[in-house]
Image (cartoon, rainbow, N blue to C red):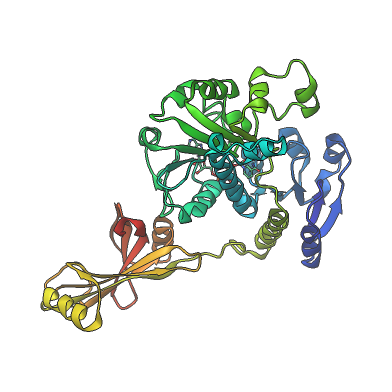
Amino acid sequence: MDIKILHIDSNHPLLWNQLQNAGFINHSDFTSSKEEIESKIQDYQGIVIRSRFKIDKAFLDKATNLQFIARVGAGLESIDCEYAESKNITLIAAPEGNRNAVAEHTLGMILSLFNKLNEADREIRSGHWNRESNRGHELDGKTVGIIGYGNMGKSFAKKLRGFDAEVLCYDIQANVGDSNAKQVSLQEFQEKVDVVSLHIPWTSETDKMVDADFINGFAKSFWIVNTSRGKNIVTADLVAAMESGKIFGAGLDVLEYEKLSFETLFHDKNTPEAFQYLLKAKNVILSPHIAGWTFESHERLAQVIVDKIKAKYSGQAKVAEPEKRATGIGGLFFKSKNPKELVAWYGKHLGLKTDDYGSTFWWKDNDGNDCSTQWSPFADDTVYFAPSEKQFMQNFRVNDLEGLLKKLSDEGVTIVGDMETYEYGKFGWVLDSEGNKIELWEPIDKAFQ
Ligand SMILES: NC(=O)c1ccc[n+]([C@@H]2O[C@H](COP(=O)([O-])OP(=O)(O)OC[C@H]3O[C@@H](n4cnc5c(N)ncnc54)[C@H](O)[C@@H]3O)[C@@H](O)[C@H]2O)c1
């Protein structure tokens, strides 16, 4: 069957061209009103949107043949997702396409705030050469806290790897932390952090989340950056905290007032007082919702959308990020008559750096992450390899242990025991076709460093 796609916003040309080459039929309509689009949407299996209008129940009721909605952006806030899903419509977004842009923008804002780059630049242009008042701060040794550890949060944490800063994250979902950011409770987060970066969606829970109470819950004064949604922060409370010194400075790519016309915002005498303060404050950097808006993301967003549409129709689960199961060797464990002596032998003759458990090898994966592999002799009478009677046990590194164990169980693989969680990762055990026990490890390598 022909798949007809209606594009209602312009995008990078590759989106159109690649879909066309793949056999999809593209139509565009960048100008008709929502009502006009509604009157013809029943002819289409797919719609590609950016932010032109909301896709609500009324629209979806008219879209009787729609199979997917693809949004060329990170989120799907402008779509009634629940209703669309109840009609079996696939929702496609492309956070993979602009997460790097958001991460770099966030880091740029923090470094500019810390080093007073914008203010110093303005002063020089107006003929002032002030060094002492523009003395900066360093990220080194600070604790950076990320609220919302999803696509954007994780990408930002990755950028911080080269800084000697501690990185914490707070998220309502459990077990999202990784080797780039340690997940902590909100209480620990508020006790420790010096810089807060928001990467949460706009929901009923995150609306006005950063208000006076929330800000005063932090033990120290801090800097804040918001690249998520303007309404996550009560701007008047942010300004009060800047006046009192509780907040040192703010980088705001999104504003509470964004939906208002900026024409009126700048010229109207009703301009909110808090906004007027932000416009004058030296310790504030503003940008017009462009954190994810780069030349590279323009192209990448389009590519992710094409890949996901093609994947939907080729029956593949995912094109952009193929499923990874075992991602490396996590360890080799074997029985030994005298582990202590054996470890000493390897230390002396092969130069292994050993401890009571054997030796840990460090290496980097293709993304530059620090990874470790453990080599360990076990006492001959160990039961750790049971029910296998072999002299050895392999350990493989995996990404999503819980998901993998479920898939393996569905595939009829024997699972041994229950998954266990430790500070250095999650562990699960399975048997291969010859009854050899395999340990699967979703690692937190950092715990060993
Ligand atoms: N400024 C820009 O140009 C730009 C670009 C892309 C995305 N964004 C925004 O960035 C935000 C994050 O996008 P994403 O793709 O990373 O989303 P995501 O869904 O991948 O991740 C969001 C994370 O926030 C967590 N979360 C939800 N409610 C929370 C709460 N109350 N407290 C703590 N954590 C909570 C979720 O569990 C999730 O892990 C969104 O608001 C998105 O619109 C902005």
For the C terminus, the quadrant is bottom left
For the N terminus, the quadrant is bottom right
Is the residue 118 above or below the residue 165 in the image? above
- Measured as percent of width and height from the top left, residue 55 is found at 73, 38
Residue in the picture at 63% in, 64% down: 315
Quick one: 222 or 281, which is closer to the camera? 281
Residue in the picture at 63% in, 21% down: 274
Count of numbered labels shown in the rendering: 0
Tell whether 128 sits left or right of 138: right
- Measured as percent of width and height from the top left, residue 165 is found at 42, 48
Tell whether 30 sits left or right of 427: right
Residue in the picture at 70% in, 36% down: 127
Quick one: 185 or 123, which is closer to the camera? 123
Q: Residue furthest top?
A: 269
Asked if one can make out residue 78 in the rendered structure from this viewpoint, the answer is: no
Tell whether 444 sits left or right of 296: left
State which quadrant residue 208 falls in: top right
Q: Quadrant of ligand 1?
A: top right
- Measured as percent of width and height from the top left, residue 104 is found at 59, 50
Residue in the picture at 72% in, 34% down: 126
Quick one: 413 or 323, which is closer to the camera? 323
Asked if one can make out residue 91 in the rendered structure from this viewpoint, the answer is: yes
- Measured as percent of width and height from the top left, residue 179 is found at 40, 55
